[in-house]
Image (cartoon, rainbow, N blue to C red):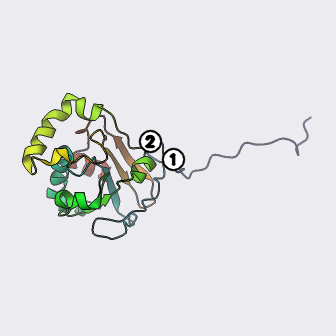
Amino acid sequence: MADPALTTTPPAPTASPTVRAGRRLAVGDVAPPLAATSLAGAAIAPPRPGEVLYLQFRRFAGCPVCNLHLRQVAARVDELRAAGVRVVAVFHSEAATMVPYQGDLPFEVIADPGKALYRAFAVEASWRSILDPRSWWPMLRGMFARHPWSARRGEGGHLGLPAEFLLGADGVVRAAHYGRHAADHWSVDQVLALARG
């Protein structure tokens, strides 16, 4: 008979999720801390009780696809807010470069030129971002929608892939999407459905 003092029992699994900084996040993971300041100079607050944070990682400040998408989000921001969704977008450009493109958006925008948040959330870059034919039409539409010259302003590189997360007030990931090309992101309708689900 085994000595009970020498037997070990594996620890019971915990119900609390774990932080997975630097690796792709999945539903149920705790997101890395969002220690950042908006273009307006305010600290980004964590989601409040009853609120869902829609955190988007975009490409560079002049990205035509990103800016087209963000204008669509901005046009429906009141609808998102009414559903308890707060929007925050991150770019890997300098704040001064972002102001002409994102400075008038009706939600928080973060400049992350050092890509610290991109690394923490495992947001990647790839040639697929611009070589995938599904991104070409949105690129052209975005280029001529507002700033035809903007696509040249690619500090941090043109190869970034988008990523999006819905974070609950507890910091837990409720939904996650890592884009496969520059135009692979949730529509506003998808965000609303995910937030309500």
- Callout 2 environment at 10 Å: few (<14), some (14 to 19), or many (20+)? some
State the image coordinates of residue 29 (x, y, percent, origin top left): 48, 48
State the image coordinates of residue 197 (x, y, percent, origin top left): 32, 49
Q: Does the rendering let one see residue 59? A: yes
Quarter assignment of residue 151: top left
Residue closer to the observer: 115 or 54:
115
Left of 109 or right of it: where is 14?
right
- Callout 1 environment at 10 Å: few (<14), some (14 to 19), or many (20+)? some
- In the rendered image, which residue does mark 1 sit on? 20
Q: Amino acid at mark 2?
A: Arg
Q: Which residue occupies 48% across, 42% down?
A: 23
Residue closer to the observer: 158 or 164:
158
State the image coordinates of residue 157 (x, y, percent, origin top left): 30, 43
Quarter assignment of residue 183: top left
Q: Amino acid at mark 1?
A: Arg
Q: Are marks 2 and 1 in contact (CB under 8 Å)?
A: yes
Q: Which residue occupies 17% across, 60% down?
A: 100
Alpha carbons under labels 2 and 1: distance apart: 7 Å
Q: Which residue occupies 40% across, 64% down?
A: 46
State the image coordinates of residue 149 (x, y, percent, origin top left): 11, 47
Number of marks in picture = 2
- In the rendered image, which residue does mark 2 sit on? 24
Left of 124 or right of it: where is 89?
left
143 w.r.t. 96: above or below = above
Left of 100 or right of it: where is 93?
right
Secondary structure, mark 1, is: loop
Quarter assignment of residue 37: bottom left
Q: Quadrant of the N terminus?
A: top right
Residue closer to the observer: 177 or 147:
147
Q: Which residue occupies 42% across, 53% down?
A: 116
